[in-house]
Image: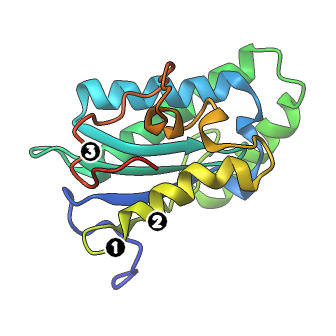
């Protein structure tokens, strides 16, 4: 797919990413899976050179505005993030009280076999719909991310949604599930 406009070409540029569960399955309707995402993002921030400027977890996908610190590669971070979260979510499905266990495992196993891209279960789509933000209106992308839960009728105001960085941009920020990059080098504004 050379020439694909959604490929990551500059490993240290800021990107708007969309990571999606296969077949748009609503996996993140359960807190356990959302928490795995938050813990994994924080791990990548602390240990893998990831800078997160904005994020949201929706029912079947996540949006991120991220950048890799110098000496790190965003493609490597994403690969490791998806691999780790896949394993953790598989464990949670297999060992937890998941009412959709058989159905989920069947879908994820079928996709692994169909694509040959995972040994047992494939949870994430391969693409990340990466958009280089070097020359794009970042404020518009941040607003898009933060308004996703409002558009989905989950909350009335963006900063009322716990699984989003909109809380961090609100004047009354009290809870942060993911440690966003404090200097906000891409933008200096409140959404």
User: Marks 2 and 3, Cα distance to the nearest angstrom?
Assistant: 15 Å
Secondary structure beneath disc 1?
A: loop
N-term-proximal mark, 2 vs 3: 2
103 horizontally vs 66: left or right: right
Q: From the image, tell me which residue sits under label 2.
A: 140
Q: Using residue 76 as the reference point, say whether residue 32 is left or right of it.
A: right
Q: Is residue 89 left or right of residue 64?
A: right
Which residue, as the protein is rendered here, is positioned at the far bottom? Answer: 3
| Label 2 element class | helix
Front: mark 1 or 2: 2
Q: Which residue is mark 3?
A: 184
Which image quarter holds the N terminus? bottom left
Q: CA distance from mark 3 to mark 1?
A: 16 Å
Q: Which residue is mark 1?
A: 136
The reply to whether discs 1 and 2 touch (Cβ–Cβ < 8 Å) is yes
Q: Position of residue 76 (x, y in %)?
A: 29, 47
């Amino acid at each position: 797919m050379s020439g694909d406009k959604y490929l990551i070409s500059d490993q240290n540029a800021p990107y708007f990413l969309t990571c999606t569960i296969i077949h748009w399955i609503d996996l993140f309707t359960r807190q356990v899976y959302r928490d795995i995402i938050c813990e994994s993002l924080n791990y990548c921030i602390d240990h893998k050179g990831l800078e997160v400027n904005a994020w949201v977890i929706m029912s079947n996908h996540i949006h991120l505005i991220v950048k890799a610190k110098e000496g790190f590669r965003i493609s490597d971070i994403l690969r490791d993030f998806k691999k780790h979260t896949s394993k953790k979510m598989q464990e949670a499905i297999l060992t937890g009280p998941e009412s959709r266990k058989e159905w989920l495992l069947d879908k994820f196993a079928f996709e692994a076999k169909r694509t040959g891209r995972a040994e047992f279960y494939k949870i994430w789509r391969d693409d990340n719909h990466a958009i280089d933000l070097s020359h794009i209106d970042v404020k518009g992308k941040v607003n898009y991310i933060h308004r996703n839960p409002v558009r989905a009728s989950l909350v009335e105001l963006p900063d009322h949604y716990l699984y989003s960085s909109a809380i961090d941009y609100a004047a009354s920020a009290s809870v942060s599930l993911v440690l966003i990059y404090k200097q906000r080098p891409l933008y200096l504004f409140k959404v």
